[in-house]
Image (tube, grey):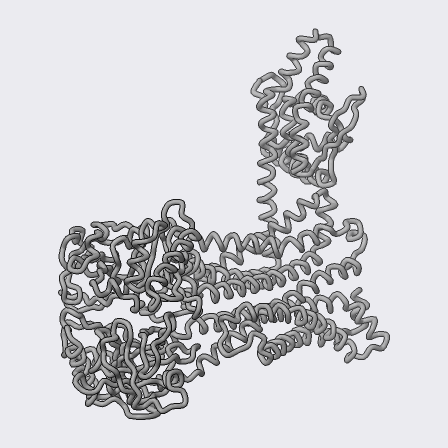
């Protein structure tokens, strides 16, 4: 490049000189100065064109040389297929796993929400700094106060879960719906493709029967009817007017099929105890998230003073919406991204080593090229072009690897849950993933190619040409570089293996946690009874009891029950309570406990032990004494050291008018989440407290899935308009509950295994090469009387020393990684000794195997052959 | 290349100029004007080289690393660029010359078949 600059800068001067000389020649031949000058100019030709052509030369030649380098590079790669295949496959896996993980990160973390200005949307949560609760759902009254008092949001809206049964169709279907206050779509910058958003007055009772259809629902159930707006549809037995249809890109909350207007009754408007809303808002123009947070905290402080009983200690948490949605996936995904990055680094080190070896065997060629006038830059470029070709080859194959990983669904989830993960459906190889892969491929090529290229271009020409064989001094320096590379590989591998080991151990621990009930052969499914049809507790209870009796009598059914909340999946419902005989709690210290509504047969079906007292019976009806069963955690928290049976408790807050309930049983703890101990829980019999959405829990004798259809038939027999949804076995629920741990554990194990293979290959390559370079030396040693055993331990010692240094350097790195992922671990310390010792032993074993073969070979070196060879 | 037509003068084939420059530089480094003169003189003024077309060719050869340019002083003590053949250029000249010989022989065989046979 410098040459070009100099040559072109001098061009004008060169041409001027040239013409002057020619003019001088002509004058000497007897022309007049003027004639001489014009003759010289004529002879020279078109000045401008000459200059242009000269400039073009540089561009063209540069391209020409690039093509030449590419052709040469391809020829060199073809000439050594062994090297090319090993390097390309190594890269294919290294780049492939990066592409794979990036495609997931891209969909789940980077662009889970396709809103035009993702930075302007926030989620609003209640926060209780005193009890370390970061995200608690707002109550209706608090939400309404936030809305009325803030000056920082353009739009603020609330959303609540909504089970919507679509009627008026051949097969009744449950829709995944949400009730949203007017302003919701505006807060999310979303506009319908047909119709309009909800009007402010539609947020009042009686006017709230308007629905927004999702694109999918509109296509599947309404044949994409362009005149659907204004028409009535039947949801939960009530006529709703279609207000509009959202576009295909809008799916928030993830998987939503239908939205309807949310209104608050006068009672709800003053409810500060029922936490069930989600709130979203759009920052006003020029308002920063910090300012919004400050104002909302001020509002929360005012509300706490105004309503100390319910609001003491409650702050507002203003969270970027994307963060609020991706919080849980972030840590494991970042860990996996870091892991694949390390895998790629290890792959790079391996290929660098191969290239260094290649540079050694090609130093004759390089020296000749240098002797023939190739500059150092040109030589580096030649090597880099070769590396880039390898990188592109690896990248191309890598996309294939990533595609296969996605195709075989290395990570999977039942569709019922996958649909609720924002961005899940968008995981795939798209343009941004391809861009990432191209950048990674070329970047990788630079990383693994630069060092060997610099090294290869530095051979001292005359030294190389003078000596007919390998130069020992050069070999030593190159050997050091290769050793540094292999030590880093071992260190990185140890860190990866240790992290994988911790994750796997944590996963196994979690898998072995007893959930407190027997999850084998249990089928679950949900039923959401419409309020319009099932108007009373009694009607709902009758439906479920009638249904359970029918299911109970099906062949293959051992026992059947119903419950409003299923364990393991982290769903929950809590309520504030009072214990009889205890003083009124201080503000902000309201005792609360999870509450569950179950049929009489629940404990027996789930095989939850009744530790004290009695099981629920059919005698526990709406007219009899109100009763409650509590779990051990509840007993320990509220009646430590006492027998709770016969004691009394009641609700506070909105259900405070209900009578006192007598504890009739203490049952075993069961886990809502496998990685957390059971909190205080209370159970109420279905007859005394009902809810419209309940889950059936059926323990079967054969495979539970095989009974799904016959149970469905029984439901249709009781109410033919009643759909069921989310049909899953308890095993599947259990698997879903440990999905993050399973995904991180298995993927980490896979990556670490791959790293281990690479490190083994790298070590083998380095030691084998060192042996072949030292054949002469070993020959002399043997000739001077060294025993084969000594040669063997010499070589083995060299390899194992490298491995040991790598392990030592890797240990702090591995510990760092362990602490970095400690938040993802269950029941395993981040510095778990057995894990670290185990993976170090595995790595040492692999290192031994990798050095063993070359050491054996060195042992058998025939001194005569070795010396003659030199 | 020139578009003027004068009797007895032959236009250069594409790429031939490169060969002529390499061949001329084999005799020693020279500056641009002297190179043009030398080519004219050695071809007994039969080959017509528009002097300007020398420069793109020189730059092309430099870029290919077949020749190099050094600062120097000419006969009348003026600063000038001297072009010199590199080792790579020397090798290239050998390749190009043998190519040229083959081409010339082939064309000659086609144009004068009998003479060639007689020589065999």
Residue drawn at (86%, 75%) of the image: A784
Residue drawn at (68%, 18%) of the image: A19
Is residue A712 visible to us here?
yes
Query: Where residue A230 sits: x, y (%)?
Result: 15, 53
Query: Where residue A48 sits: x, y (%)?
Result: 58, 22
Total label count? 0
Quadrant housing residue A641: bottom left
A180 horizontally vs A801: left or right: left
Q: Nearer the viewer, residue A641 or A112?
A: A641
* A7 is higher (above) or lower (below) than A329: above
Query: Where residue A247 sits: x, y (%)?
Result: 27, 53
Q: Nearer the viewer, residue A169 or B62?
A: A169
Residue drawn at (56%, 20%) of the image: B3
Q: Nearer the viewer, residue A773 or A491?
A: A491
Residue drawn at (73%, 69%) of the image: A771
Quarter that holds the N terminus of chain A: top right
Quadrant housing residue A237: bottom left
């Amino acid at each position: 490049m410098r040459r070009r600059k100099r040559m072109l800068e001098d061009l004008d001067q060169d041409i001027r000189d040239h013409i002057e000389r020619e003019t001088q020649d002509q004058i000497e031949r007897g022309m007049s100065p003027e004639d001489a000058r014009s003759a010289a100019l004529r002879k020279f030709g078109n000045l401008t064109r000459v200059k242009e052509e000269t400039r073009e030369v540089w561009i063209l030649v540069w391209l020409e040389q690039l093509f030449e380098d590419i052709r040469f590079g391809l020829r060199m790669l073809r000439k050594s297929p062994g090297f090319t295949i090993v390097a390309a496959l190594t890269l294919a896996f290294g780049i492939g796993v990066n592409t794979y993980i990036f495609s997931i990160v891209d969909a789940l973390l980077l662009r889970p929400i396709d809103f035009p200005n993702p930075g302007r949307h926030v989620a609003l949560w209640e926060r209780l700094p005193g009890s370390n609760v970061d995200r608690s759902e707002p109550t209706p009254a608090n939400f309404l106060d936030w809305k009325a008092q803030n000056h920082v949001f353009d739009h603020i809206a609330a959303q609540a879960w909504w089970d919507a049964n679509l009627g008026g169709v051949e097969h009744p279907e449950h829709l995944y719906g949400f009730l949203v206050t007017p302003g919701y779509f505006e807060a999310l910058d979303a506009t319908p493709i047909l119709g309009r958003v909800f009007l402010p007055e539609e947020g009042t009772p009686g006017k709230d029967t308007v629905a927004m259809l999702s694109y999918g629902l509109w296509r599947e159930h309404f044949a994409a009817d362009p005149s659907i707006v204004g028409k009535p549809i039947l949801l939960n037995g009530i006529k709703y007017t279609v207000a509009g249809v959202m576009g295909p890109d809008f799916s928030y909350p993830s998987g939503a099929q239908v939205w309807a207007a949310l209104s608050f009754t006068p009672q709800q408007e003053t409810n500060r105890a029922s936490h069930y809303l989600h709130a979203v808002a759009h920052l006003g123009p020029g308002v920063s998230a910090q300012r919004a947070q400050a104002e909302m905290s001020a509002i929360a402080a005012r509300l706490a003073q105004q309503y100390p009983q319910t609001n003491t200690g409650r702050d507002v948490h203003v969270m970027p919406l994307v963060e609020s949605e991706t919080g849980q996936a972030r840590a494991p995904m970042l860990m996996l991204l870091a892991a694949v990055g390390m895998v790629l680094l290890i792959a790079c080190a391996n290929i660098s080593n191969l290239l260094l070896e290649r540079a050694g065997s090609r130093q004759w060629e390089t020296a000749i090229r240098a002797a023939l006038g190739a500059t150092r830059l040109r030589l580096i470029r030649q090597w880099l072009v070769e590396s880039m070709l390898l990188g592109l080859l690896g990248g191309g194959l890598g996309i294939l690897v990533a595609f296969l990983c996605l195709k075989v669904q290395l990570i999977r989830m039942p569709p019922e849950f996958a649909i609720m993960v924002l961005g899940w459906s968008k995981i795939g190889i798209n343009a941004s993933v391809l861009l990432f892969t191209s950048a990674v491929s070329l970047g990788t090529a630079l990383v693994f190619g630069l060092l060997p290229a610099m090294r290869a271009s530095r051979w001292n020409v005359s030294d190389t040409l003078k000596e007919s064989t390998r130069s020992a001094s050069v070999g030593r320096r190159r050997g050091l570089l290769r050793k540094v590379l292999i030590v880093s590989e071992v260190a990185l591998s140890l860190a990866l293996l240790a992290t994988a080991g911790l994750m796997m151990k944590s996963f196994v621990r979690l898998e072995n946690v007893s959930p407190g009930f027997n999850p084998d052969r249990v089928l679950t499914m949900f039923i959401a009874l419409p309020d319009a049809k099932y108007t009373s507790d009694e009607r709902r209870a009758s439906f479920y009891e009638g249904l359970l009796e029918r299911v109970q009598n099906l062949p293959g059914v051992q026992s059947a029950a119903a419950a409003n909340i299923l364990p393991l999946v982290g769903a929950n419902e809590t309520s504030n309570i009072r214990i009889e005989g205890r003083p009124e709690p201080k503000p902000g210290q309201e005792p609360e406990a999870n509450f569950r509504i179950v049929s009489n047969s629940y404990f027996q079906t789930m095989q939850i032990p009744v530790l004290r007292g009695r099981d629920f019976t059919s005698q526990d009806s709406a007219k009899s004494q109100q009763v409650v069963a509590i779990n051990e955690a509840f007993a320990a928290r509220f009646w430590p050291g006492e027998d709770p049976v016969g004691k009394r408790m009641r609700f506070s807050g909105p259900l405070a008018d209900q009578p006192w309930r007598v504890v009739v049983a203490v049952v075993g703890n069961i886990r809502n989440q496998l990685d957390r101990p059971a909190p205080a829980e209370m159970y109420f019999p279905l007859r005394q407290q009902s809810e419209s959405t309940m889950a059936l829990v059926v323990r079967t004798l054969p495979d539970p899935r095989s009974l799904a259809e016959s149970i469905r038939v029984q439901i249709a027999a009781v109410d033919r308009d009643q759909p069921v949804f989310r049909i899953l076995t308890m095993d599947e629920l259990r698997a879903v509950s440990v999905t993050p741990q399973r995904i991180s554990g298995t993927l980490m194990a896979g990556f670490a295994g791959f790293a281990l293979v690479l490190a083994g290959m790298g070590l083998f390559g380095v030691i084998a090469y060192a042996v072949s370079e030292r054949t002469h030396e070993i020959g002399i040693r043997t000739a001077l009387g060294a025993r084969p055993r000594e040669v063997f331990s010499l070589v083995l010692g060299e390899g194992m020393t490298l491995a040991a240094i790598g392990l030592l350097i890797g240990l702090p790195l591995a510990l760092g990684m362990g602490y970095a992922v400690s938040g993802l671990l269950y029941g395993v310390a981040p510095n778990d000794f057995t894990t670290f010792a185990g993976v170090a032993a595995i790595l040492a074993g692999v290192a031994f195997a990798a050095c063993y073969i070359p050491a054996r070979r060195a042992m058998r070196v025939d001194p005569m052959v070795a010396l003659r060879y030199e | 290349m020139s578009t003027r037509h004068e009797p007895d003068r032959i236009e250069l084939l594409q790429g031939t100029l490169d060969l002529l420059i390499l061949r001329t530089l084999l005799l020693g480094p020279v500056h641009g004007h002297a190179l043009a003169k030398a080519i004219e003189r050695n071809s007994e003024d039969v080959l017509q080289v528009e002097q300007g077309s020398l420069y793109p060719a020189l730059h092309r050869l430099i870029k290919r690393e077949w020749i190099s340019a050094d600062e120097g002083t000419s006969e009348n003590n003026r600063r000038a660029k001297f072009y010199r053949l590199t080792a790579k250029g020397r090798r290239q000249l050998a390749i190009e010359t043998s190519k040229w010989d083959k081409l010339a022989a082939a064309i000659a065989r086609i144009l004068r078949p009998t003479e060639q046979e007689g020589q065999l």
